[in-house]
Image (cartoon, helix red, strand yellow):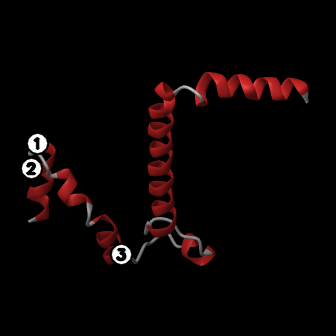
């Protein structure tokens, strides 16, 4: 118990009590939050994830419209700057 208290006080002295390392905690915390949010979105809303056993058994997916809605927000971000990938994908959209 004494060793644990000593280790925790050492951690506090090295990391928490020094304001210079607080931005590290903020950046790592923000990255963890973004990662958790994206993972949760894909687990809950992705048309390729099926929690129902009968839906998982079917090899054919009948949810093309749901897939288009799920991916609709990606178009603006992907086209911020023009490149060969954007132009190739645009030619297939028409």
Dot 2, how many residues are within 10 Å of its Cα: few (below 14), some (14-19), or many (20+)? few
Circle 3 SS class = helix
Residue 63: name its quadrant: bottom left
Image spot of residue 9 (x, y percent): 74, 26
Q: Nearer the viewer, residue 89 or 43?
A: 43
Q: Residue at x 66, y 28 (%)?
A: 12
Circle 1 SS class = helix
Q: Nearer the viewer, residue 68 or 28?
A: 28
Residue 76: name its quadrant: bottom left
In this image, 68 relative to 42: left or right? left
Circle 2 SS class = helix
Residue 4, disc: none
Residue 66, disc: 3
Image spot of residue 87 (x, y percent): 9, 50
Image spot of residue 58 (x, y percent): 52, 73
Q: Residue at x 44, y 72 (%)?
A: 60
Dot 1, how many residues are within 10 Å of its Cα: few (below 14), some (14-19), or many (20+)? few
Dot 3, how many residues are within 10 Å of its Cα: few (below 14), some (14-19), or many (20+)? some
Residue identified by numbered label 2 = 87
Which residue extends farthest right?
1
Residue identified by numbered label 1 = 84
Quadrant occupied by the N terminus:
top right
**Are the residues tagged 2 and 1 within 8 Å (C-beta)?**
yes
Q: Residue at x 71, y 22 (%)?
A: 10
Q: If you read the primary sequence from the N terminus, does the residue marked by circle 3 or circle 2 appear first?
A: 3
């Amino acid at each position: 118990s004494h060793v644990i208290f000593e280790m925790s006080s050492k951690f506090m002295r090295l990391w928490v009590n020094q304001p210079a390392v607080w931005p590290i905690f903020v950046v790592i915390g923000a990255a963890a939050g973004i990662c958790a949010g994206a993972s949760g979105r894909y687990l809950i809303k992705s048309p390729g994830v099926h929690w129902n056993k009968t839906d998982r058994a079917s090899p054919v997916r009948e949810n093309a419209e749901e897939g288009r809605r799920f991916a609709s927000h990606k178009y603006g971000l992907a086209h911020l700057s023009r490149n060969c990938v954007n132009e190739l994908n645009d030619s297939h959209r028409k």
